Amino acid sequence: MMRLPYFTYHAPRSLNEAVDLLARGGAMVIAGGTDLLPNMKRRQQVPRALVGLRGLTELRHVSNGDGVTIGAGVTLSEIVRDMRFRGPYAGLWQAASQIATPQLRNMGTIGGNLCLDTRCNYYDQNYEWRKAIDFCMKKDERASERGAPQVCWVATSSPRCLAVSSTDTAPALVALGATVTLTGPDGARTIPLTALYRNDGIDYLTRRPHEILTSVHLAALDGWKSTYWKLRRRGSFDFPVLGVAAALKLAADGTVEASRIVLGAVASRPLESPDAAPALAGKRLTDEVIAEAAALAAQPARPMDNTDYTLHWRKRVTRDLVVYALRELRGDDTRGLRRKIARIEMLSVANP
């Protein structure tokens, strides 16, 4: 049985108190704990203290205005139940609906999923297993401390860690043009969500050490549609081995005015596809246009052999999932494909 290490737990009553506790050093924030606590049992993270955020009511609200603002402490289940996350924001609803299991969605928060630790078959093992391979470069307690070289076991010649981003909501929110607010000792700052991530398995967040992600903002997206497709071995619980988020705005005549396609689980950050949008701009979503855009969208994908399935197949199937996503946004009935790929019933953008 894997047990938690010893730690001190703080339950701040305000966001300012939480920031002050975090600034003392040696602490990590915890909301739902669905990722952090298993990591602590595996000794992937061993903080001296945890700063609990669940009691901070200012992080638990969804508010309307110029779009929608989601507090970072809002649970994934609350997002799934909220009818405001249909219509233009359906991609976020679909992403949240496919995360883990109902019990974990009841605890897990949107802020926690956006800050989800990167994953790797060599890293996500217990301490004894990792010790047997002399650890890896992602873990601080690494072989280099004894004079041995730092190694990424996925690609032994790699100068950086290739652990993969496995958040479902981040690709969906990047496709929707979301921004996030981070609050620290120097105050609050708002950045595009895409700027929160680096393509580095170890240093994968640009969040400053003592900052807390406090909210997510979505602008009003009149005329937009969005969708999220997830590939995993089982119909529940599993992390994605591929995620495809797509959002687009159609003109009255059916031509594409604007679009975004974002891939998940193929790099250490959500990966935008810059060449796909120009291929769609000003065109109708014919089969030929969709096939061309899908091929361009899949080009940046560089999946590594550090998650489920073979990397070569995951590379090939990226194009297929982009095709399915764009067909759904076109208005095709993709419910049969949803059942085949996701193995669950899923709200369709074309057939809600």
Image (cartoon, rainbow, N blue to C red):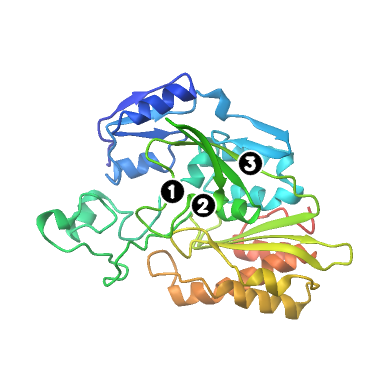
User: Dot 2 corresponds to which residue?
Assistant: 195
Residue type, label 3 = His
The crowding category of the residue bearing disc 1, from other C-alpha atoms within 10 Å (few below 14, some 14 to 19, many at least 20), is few
Q: Secondary structure at mark 3?
A: strand
Residue 159, given in percent of the width and then of the height, sits at: 29, 67
Residue type, label 1 = Thr
Residue type, label 2 = Ala
The crowding category of the residue bearing disc 3, from other C-alpha atoms within 10 Å (few below 14, some 14 to 19, many at least 20), is many
Q: Is residue 115 left or right of residue 68?
A: left
Determine whether label 1 and label 2 are within 8 Å by CB. Answer: yes
Residue 295, given in percent of the width and then of the height, sits at: 61, 78
Q: Is residue 236 left or right of residue 91?
A: left
Residue 114, given in percent of the width and then of the height, sits at: 51, 46
Give the label on residue 206, or none: 1
Determine whether label 2 and label 3 are within 8 Å by CB. Answer: no
Residue sitting at x 23%, y 55%: 130
User: Dot 3 corresponds to which residue?
Assistant: 217
- Whichever of callouts 1 and 3 sits on the residue coming sooner in the sequence is 1
- Whichever of callouts 1 and 2 sits on the residue coming sooner in the sequence is 2
Residue 279, given in percent of the width and then of the height, sits at: 69, 74
Residue sitting at x 16%, y 57%: 143
Real-space CA distance between mark 2 and mark 3, rounded to the nearest whole angstrom: 14 Å
Q: Secondary structure at mark 1?
A: loop
**If the image is split into quadrants, where does the N terminus sit?**
top left
Q: Is residue 115 above or below residue 251?
A: above
Residue 333 in sight here: no
- Whichever of callouts 2 and 3 sits on the residue coming sooner in the sequence is 2
